[in-house]
Image (cartoon, rainbow, N blue to C red):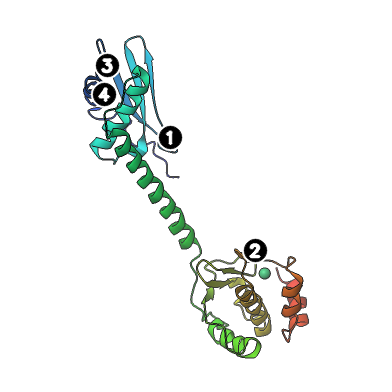
Amino acid sequence: MTPRTSHPRHVPGGAMLFQRMYTRLNCEGRPPHFVVEFYPYANLTHSIRLWQDTANVRLSDLLRDAPLEVIEAAAAILLSRLYRRRLPRGIAELYRNYSQAHATRQKLHAVRSKRARRKIRDAQGQRHDLAKLFDELNEKYFQGSMPRPKVGWSTRRWRSQLGIFDPALDQIAINAALDRPHVPEYVVAYVLYHEMLHRKHPIKLARCRLEAHSREFRAEEKKFRDYRRAMKFLKRFA
Ligand SMILES: [Zn+2]
């Protein structure tokens, strides 16, 4: 969440807008004095409080860039609740459409940033080439039947995981900490093979440490030629 404190809170034309909606809803009597401000609510929440002849309104500042009619709709909804007035036709719907679109945008944004966080580097590292290794492993252990997913080195060195297979992206990322001269190729090949097995036996998201996997998975993993040597190396690896 980005800080929003630098923005002015005052809603330009807010008081007029509320008076207008007050009239449109046929509220009775003299309208209160409206004080309208944007407030950094985490979602599309708005509030209105009447105290003597002043109505203090807080609109979620997520409405800052909303079209005028949406702000009007939010005002009408608040006033209709406060004064128990019927909402003019179409307003509830207009507002609902806006908030649903807003929710969709937020979801999209979350997905995109998650994907951005899982960006990977090229398969060709400084020391080891994952694409070449993938093809060799595919030939040797999968009869060449596995279509190549996106394969690459992690952008940063991870402390506690060796690789990830993300089925949503069809992507294997290998810890860049393994792309170093003192790490033997069979170790990198083992970690990649392990992730390829995750691709073969799909689960949600494999974040691999040396944790338990299913029995079948482990059995198949042990077919890797340098399994023992690789495990031995990785147990010392930090
Ligand atoms: Zn795993």
Dot 4 or dot 3: first in sequence order is 4
Q: Nearer the viewer, mark 2 or mark 3?
A: 3
Q: Is residue 197 above or below residue 1?
A: below
Q: Disc 2 versus disc 1: distance between alpha carbons?
A: 36 Å
| Nearer to the camera, 50 or 117 | 50
Q: Which residue is mark 3?
A: 27
Query: Which badge, 3 or 1, is on the more N-terminal residue?
Result: 3
Q: Is residue 50 above or below residue 1?
A: above
How far apart, in angstroms, are the residues tagged by discs 3 and 1?
28 Å
**Residue at numbered disc 4:** 18
Q: Earlier in the sequence, mark 1 or mark 4?
A: 4
84 relative to 111, above or below: above
Judge depth for marks 2 and 1 and give the one in front: 1
Does residue 206 appear to the left or right of 224 in the view shown?
A: left
x, y (%) of residue 38?
Answer: 34, 31
Tell me the tag on residue 41: 1
Q: Nearer the viewer, residue 157 or 50?
A: 50
Label 3: element kind: loop
Crowding at dot 1, Cα within 10 Å, few <14 / some 14-19 / many 20+, comes out as few
Q: Residue at x 53, y 72 (%)?
A: 171
Q: Looking at the image, is mark 2 or mark 1 earlier in the sequence? A: 1
| Residue 154 in picture, x, y percent from top left | 54, 69
Separation of marks 4 and 3 at Cα, in angstroms? 11 Å
Q: Quadrant of residue 144?
A: bottom right
Q: Nearer the viewer, mark 4 or mark 3?
A: 3
**Residue 109, image x, y percentages:** 41, 53
**Which disc number belongs to residue 159?**
2
In-image side of 59 versus 165 (left or right): left
Question: How many numbered discs sit on the rendered protein?
Answer: 4
Closer to the camera in the image, 188 or 56: 56
